[in-house]
Image: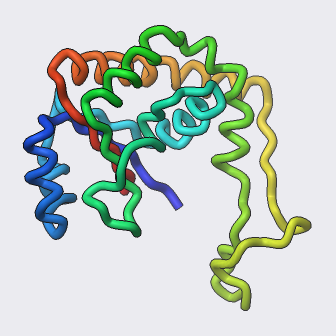
Amino acid sequence: MSLLGDLVRLSPQLREDIRSHPATAYERMTTFGDPERLELDWEWKLFGPLFTAAGFSVNPFRSGVLFPEEPNGFARALDPPQVAEASARLDRTPFTALAPHLLGALVERDTVRVDYDYDSPTYGRPLPPERIVTPSFTDEELDSYRTRLTASYTDLTHFYRAATHNGECTVFWAA
């Protein structure tokens, strides 16, 4: 299963207008372009656990309220004060401080804990402990991830800095 992640920065008023029409919220959110939209592809799946491991009180990918309040969606909205707090933490935390948590984030992302075998009678259910598949990563693979994430972390930091400067909210979603 591959989900790509996107962030949008927008005014609180526009966010509430979009939220008030849940049937068209996703369609409206996808109309944003640069610089209001930041596409993160797979990186968000690692940033979320990295920020949790590093103790971010506001995690750009796991904090906030559901948007547009749909319990089955994976979209989160942060208010301007939360955006400012996330931005401040990103600004004062170099990616090198997160790098020691990278292996744990990769294991969290790639560990198979659910039965994805369509022919299995337990399809879609949690696997018993003896069937859980935990990945391993070479030093070269970890170095490659570190290199690729560093540029995206810089983009994310600039994105949140701009949102803070403009008093904006952010909305993250994965699709």
Write down the quadrant of residue 71 in the picture.
bottom left
Dividing the picture into quarters, in which one does residue 81 lie?
top left
Q: What residue is drawn where x is 47% and y is 34%?
A: 59
Q: Position of residue 22 (x, y in %)?
A: 18, 65
The number of numbered discs placed on residues in the rendered structure image is: 0
Residue lying at 45% horizontally and 17% vertically, measured from the top left: 90
Residue 125 relative to residue 23: left or right: right
Q: Position of residue 24 (x, y in %)?
A: 13, 64
Q: Which residue lies most toward the front here?
A: 81
Image quarter where the C terminus lies is bottom left
Indicate how the structure is coloured in the image. Answer: rainbow
Q: Is residue 159 above or below residue 109?
A: above
Q: Nearer the viewer, residue 123 or 9?
A: 9
Front residue of 163/45: it is 163
- From the top left corner, tell me how far across and down residue 32 is, in percent: 14, 41
From the top left corner, tell me how far across and down residue 57 is, in percent.
51, 29
Point 79% across, 31% down: residue: 138
Identify the residue at image location x=24%, y=38%.
8
- Residue 78 is left or right of residue 109, and the answer is left
Q: Nearer the viewer, residue 21 or 137?
A: 21
Report the residue that reaches farthest toward the right.
130
